[in-house]
Image (cartoon, rainbow, N blue to C red):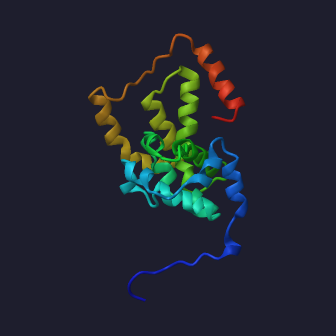
């Protein structure tokens, strides 16, 4: 077949509970107000790199396309700049919804979320231990947790960064690490981490 191909999605393949699940997200019910104007997509500095634009993601949510939304790279490409949210005429909390979609994908162990989950987990562990990120530890944890053999090919890059003092060997702790740990524990308790 030449030319464009069209995928037909049947109603029986739709996850109609997905929309209700998204509506339960704080601010998620505002997706009902989306007028598909495209302001979010036009405002997004990284929409050119997305499989689907934010506007398309919201249309897919409203159509019950759980798998397509949670398997999309769009939710991971979001730069969290809040440009879309600030310009949305319907005041939809687009960035916040994208964060929640990421968490849903991670909870469901979606294929594309595995590297992001490893990064998120490593970042959390390092920040909880030292109070701030330590890039060297983060890089090692992510590489070892996702693709240890592939990490060998990254060794020259790491060495180059280290030799130019761009990748510190030792990380520093913040002064009130216990205060930060209390904040993180409260965020975990509320389901935010």
Residue with the most extreme left position: 164
Q: Is residue 23 left or right of residue 94?
A: right
Q: Residue furthest top?
A: 175
- The reply to whether residue 145 is in sight is no
Front one among 158 and 172: 172
Q: Is residue 35 above or below residue 165?
A: below
The image quadrant that residue 41 belongs to is bottom left
Which of the 4 quarters of the picture holds residue 178?
top right
How far from the left and from the top, in percent, is residue 1? 43, 89
Q: Residue at x 61, y 56 (%)?
A: 110
Residue 144: x %, y % from top left:
51, 42
Q: Residue 169 versus residue 57: which sits nearer the camera?
A: 57
Asked where in the image residue 84 lies, by quadrant, the reply is: top left
Tag count = 0
Q: Specify the quadrant that holds the C terminus.
A: top right
Q: Nearer the viewer, residue 21 or 84?
A: 84
Against 83, is 53 above or below?
below
Q: Could you say where residue 14 lies in the image, as x and y percent from the top left?
A: 67, 68
Q: Between residues 118 and 43, which one lies in front from this camera angle?
A: 43
Q: Is residue 67 left or right of residue 39?
A: right
Q: Is residue 170 visible?
A: yes
Give the residue displayed 45% in from the left and 21% down from the top: 171
Q: Find residue 112 and report its horizontal and vertical position in percent.
A: 54, 55
């Amino acid at each position: 077949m030449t030319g464009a191909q069209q995928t037909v999605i049947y109603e029986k393949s739709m996850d109609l509970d997905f929309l209700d699940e998204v509506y339960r997200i704080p601010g998620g019910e505002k997706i009902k107000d989306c007028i598909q104007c495209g302001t979010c997509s036009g405002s997004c500095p990284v929409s050119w790199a997305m499989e689907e634009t934010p506007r398309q993601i919201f249309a897919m949510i409203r159509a019950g396309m759980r798998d397509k939304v949670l398997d999309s790279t769009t939710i991971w490409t979001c730069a969290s700049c809040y440009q879309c949210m600030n310009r949305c005429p319907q005041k939809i909390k687009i960035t916040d919804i994208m964060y929640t979609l990421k968490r849903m994908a991670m909870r469901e162990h979606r294929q594309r979320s595995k590297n992001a989950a490893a990064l998120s987990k490593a970042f959390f562990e390092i920040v909880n231990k030292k109070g701030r990120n330590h890039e060297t530890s983060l890089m090692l944890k992510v590489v070892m947790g996702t693709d240890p053999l592939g990490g060998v090919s990254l060794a020259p890059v790491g060495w180059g960064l280290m030799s130019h003092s761009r990748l510190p060997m030792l990380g520093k702790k913040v002064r009130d690490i216990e205060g930060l740990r209390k904040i993180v524990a409260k965020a975990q308790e509320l389901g935010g981490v």
